[in-house]
Image (cartoon, rainbow, N blue to C red):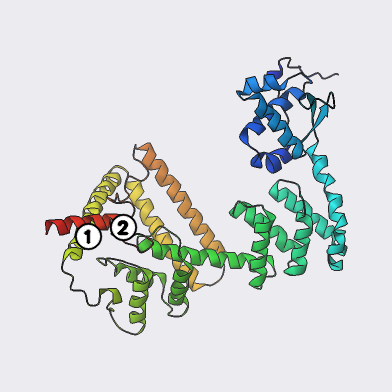
Amino acid sequence: MNFKREIIKDFYLRDTCVENIFINEYMTQAPGDYVKVYLFAIMYADFDLQMSNETIAKHLGMEDEDVLKAWSYWEKMGVVKKHYEKASDKFRYQVEFLNLKERVYGKKPKLQKTESKVPDRLKELMADDTIKDMYSEIERITGRLFTGKEPSEILSWIDDYNATPEMIVYAYSYCVKKKNHSNHKYVAAVVKEWTAQGLKTIEQIEDYLEETDNRHYLYKRVLRALGFLRNATEEEKRVMDTWFDQMGFSIEKVLDACKKTTGISNPNINYINSVLKAWSNGVDKPTPAHEEGKTGTGSISKVMKYYEELRASNELKAEGRRAEVYSRIPRVKEIEEESREIGLQISRVMLSGGNDVKNRIRDMKYRVDSLNEEKAYLMTENNFKIDYMDMVYHCPLCRDTGTQDTGDRCICFAERLAAIQKMD
């Protein structure tokens, strides 16, 4: 029995192979028109068809001069090689597309020339099967081959940071999957951070990442309760850490303190800190420093009253939209209540510790994601926008509080104050 594949005669219906090395290492840095020239010409090169620079320019809507510049650029990058018909004529030449795999592998002897700069202990490791496996696994994770000094720099982490091959592979996996980074300098910073924390095993690293992620979740809960959608600053993190680690407050108690900011003109972490300190010392409610000496009268008081009324009006409208959705889709209310309860459970588990915390939190977060997907489906299927129940603010910059996330007064505050003073 013989087998035969049908030959497609129209080459426009065929496929053109482009090396991944070109896409990953060269294309991303090249001018767009130069990439167009490369791809258009390599299509014709696969079928050994004649194509002049003038014709390429016409097809691509470019100037002839730009096509010539493209070939000079690619030759300089080592991607193609020009073969001149006459040494005296620099404008007529044949273009050879070079094998980029050979070019990359051709760089490796340069690494051997600098081996004398590599510590003796690392020289021995280069021939070790563990290191070879490490290199192979990293290339698999990143989806590219090593270039330049990357292999030797990776080895230096073992000597400089006392990192293990297992840790380095895990760092690459973490950076690619979680941070969308495969640059070895970025990975080096991660490895350095882990070793500086005294982490030595994968289990220790995972526990460290889990703890970091859990604490980040608590930070977000607090800021969200204050109406902020940004990440916490380093100083805010330090202050919040004292609430959980030194004062021993639960997340529920901290959120109760956040409720004390209702009606406060500039809710912030420092105010919450003063509330919690007072509670820790047995005092019911502190007098905020920024409120001391203020009479609460005058134009500023009128502006703050305006914001309070505006927020109340917006909340009333949002409640109406929520009631409309709950009436038409009762399941949405059930989903939100279950998600809220799971959020409280996650906070309790984070702070309580105990056995199998990591798996329990992972399962609960997975359940919340599933609930959110179901809610989104139900909303769209019933012709509601996903954010239909959300609060709609008159000023999205400050969310009708008069104060932006940076702590600065919003521009709308000055405008409203000027309007009130003018009426007065």
Q: Circle 2 is placed at which residue position? A: 410
SS at mark 2 in the image: loop
Locate residue 209, reporting x and y percent. 58, 64
Q: Is residue 346 visible?
A: no
Locate residue 76, reporting x and y percent. 75, 39
Question: As rendered, which of 382 and 62 lies closer to the eye?
Answer: 62
Residue found at x 68% / y 61%: 188
Q: Nearer the viewer, mark 1 or mark 2?
A: 2
Question: As rendered, which of 312 and 206 lies closer to the eye?
Answer: 312
Amino acid under disc 1: Glu
Mark 2 neighbour density, 10 Å: few (under 14) some (14–19) many (20 or more): some
Locate residue 320, reporting x and y percent. 24, 48
Image quarter of the N terminus: top right
SS at mark 1 in the image: helix
> Does residue 255 appear to the left or right of 22 in the view shown?
left
Say the numbered circle drawn on residue 38: none
Mark 1 neighbour density, 10 Å: few (under 14) some (14–19) many (20 or more): some
Residue found at x 88% / y 64%: 124
Mark sitting earlier along the chain (1/2) = 1
Question: As rendered, which of 292 and 92 lies closer to the eye?
Answer: 92
Q: CA distance from mark 1 to mark 2?
A: 15 Å
Locate residue 282: give its quadrant: bottom left
> Does residue 147 appear to the left or right of 210 in the view shown?
right
| Vertical arrangement, residue 100 with respect to residue 239, above or below | above
Image quarter of the C terminus: bottom left
Q: Circle 1 is placed at which residue position? A: 308
Q: Point out the residue furthest to the left here.
A: 424
Question: As rendered, which of 169 and 378 lies closer to the eye?
Answer: 169
